[in-house]
Image (cartoon, helix red, strand yellow):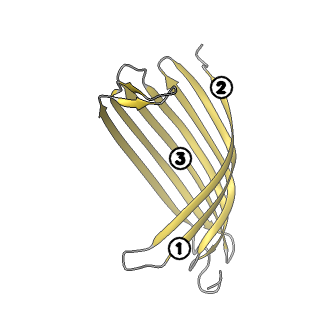
Amino acid sequence: TIAGAAEPAVREMNVRVLGSFDYIHVNSEEVNHFAGPAPVLVDLGEEDIETGSVLGIVTVPIGPSLGARGFLGVLGAKRHVDNAPEVTVGGLEMGGDIFWRDPEFGEIGVGPRYVWQDVEVGGSNQSNHSGGGALTASLFVQDFGIGPIDLDFQASVLDSEIDPDRDG
């Protein structure tokens, strides 16, 4: 089916909120570290990594085959390794897409991206700002009785600026 023949790209405005949290604990006595010509065993100890994010997404129709999507989210992470300074990350991400969509086949879109991260390691921190654009694509796979499956792809080009150690 071609776009617009059966269903519009977006039927009506909709809002989604996505949240995630990951916790990883590694208890390793030794790991291979490849810093020189030969691997060296390094005592890593225990490592804890926590990451999380909340993302709000608004999608609106702008034509029979076109839609627009905007998103705004917060993110955070913490990493602690025995005998090393703790690393914390907080930040914000935002962007949007204008996309062409065929409800039977998939969609392709393009839009701007911006990511800000504040990274603290021990007593120093830095602020990272990245801006650019993304090309997105989704392929809607036939339902084989297990529910709908979408394959999503994204290619981004971002330019980053780092503001090191604002606290001296």
| Left or right placement of residue 163 versus residue 84 in this view | right
Q: Amino acid at mark 3?
A: Gly
Q: Earlier in the sequence, mark 2 or mark 3?
A: 3
Helix, strand or loop at label 2? It is strand
Which residue is farthest front? 37
Query: What amino acid does circle 1 point to?
Result: Phe
Residue for point 40% across, 31% down: 32
Which residue is labeled 3 in the image?
A: 73
Q: Residue at x 48, y 30 (%)?
A: 34
Question: In terms of secondary structure, where does tag 1 sit?
Answer: strand
Q: Give the amino acid type for the residue marked by disc 2 in the picture.
A: Asp
Q: Residues within 10 Å of mark 2 (few under 14, many from 20)?
A: few
Instruction: Please identify, in this view, whether the residue under mark 1 or under mark 2 is nearer the observer.
Output: 1
Residue 49, image x, y percentages: 38, 35
Q: CA distance from mark 1 to mark 3?
A: 25 Å
* Residue at 35% over, 41% down: 23
Q: Which mark is residue 140?
A: 1
Label 1 environment density (alpha carbons within 10 Å; few <14, some 14–19, many ≥20):
some
